[in-house]
Image: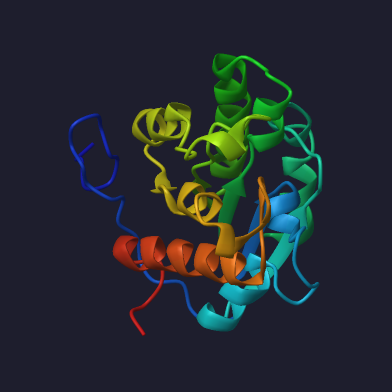
Amino acid sequence: MSCVLVPMAGCGKTPQHSALPSGTSVLAFGNSVTYGTGAQSNENYPLKLAARTGWKIHNAGIPGDTADLAKSRIADAIEESKPALVIVEIGGNDFLRQRPEAEVKEDIRAILKSVRQSGAIPVLVAVPRLSMLAVLAKPGDSPIYAELANEEGVLLVEQVFSDILSNNRLKTDPIHPNGAGYQKLADGIAETLVKSGLLAKP
């Protein structure tokens, strides 16, 4: 398969797709960051992304969720929403619980495979290596996300979440964005979707 479709290590290409029309069902799947913890109920990133895209985005974010638990509910979430696209943001709580990154990686891989088996397109949002000491250092994406993007050939939203948590003006606490942060997250996801062709340029 060509590297235009599947980004192999060193290829540097973004997977390319056809644009999804307004009204398309999309699933936002993840933890408290997908849910919108830290901001008003109308400020979560799925709502902001829906406003920009015209897609019908279902928010399946559960505060406190881990990749280990999430892999057992992805099938039901897909069955409920019947999405063409699934945006996966998960792993932060696993890191806070100090689960081995190799285990978290395989749990996320299982989620991505479930998405693919349903016929939907998976998009992965990179999550920083969160820890109780995150306030003392600039967070950066865990390497497992880039590895998974390369190995599974999925679209990756890189560094956006880490950059938000590096800016006190964009977060409510060390691990959750505020309203402005969720807007930046929605914008960063949208920019990646535009690059892949999934979202038409404004």
Looking at the rendered image, the quarter that the C terminus falls into is bottom left
Residue occupying image coordinates x 35% and y 68%: 194
Residue 103, horizontal then vertical, whole percent: 61, 16
Say whether residue 83 is visible: no
Eyeballing the image, is 168 above or below 159? below
Eyeballing the image, is 61 above or below 137? below
Q: Report the residue that reaches farthest toward the front.
A: 136
Eyeballing the image, is 4 above or below 184? above
Q: Which of 27 and 97 is in front in this view?
A: 97
Residue occupying image coordinates x 40% and y 63%: 193
Q: Nearer the viewer, residue 110 or 62?
A: 62
Q: Nearer the viewer, residue 19 or 34?
A: 34
Residue occupying image coordinates x 81% and y 40%: 64
- Residue 132, by quadrant, is top right
Looking at the rendered image, the quarter that the N terminus falls into is top left
Residue 2, horizontal then vertical, whole percent: 19, 40
- Residue 56, by quadrant, is bottom right
Residue 47, horizontal then vertical, whole percent: 67, 74
Q: Answer left or right for 136 relative to 98.
A: left
Residue 161, horizontal then vertical, whole percent: 52, 51
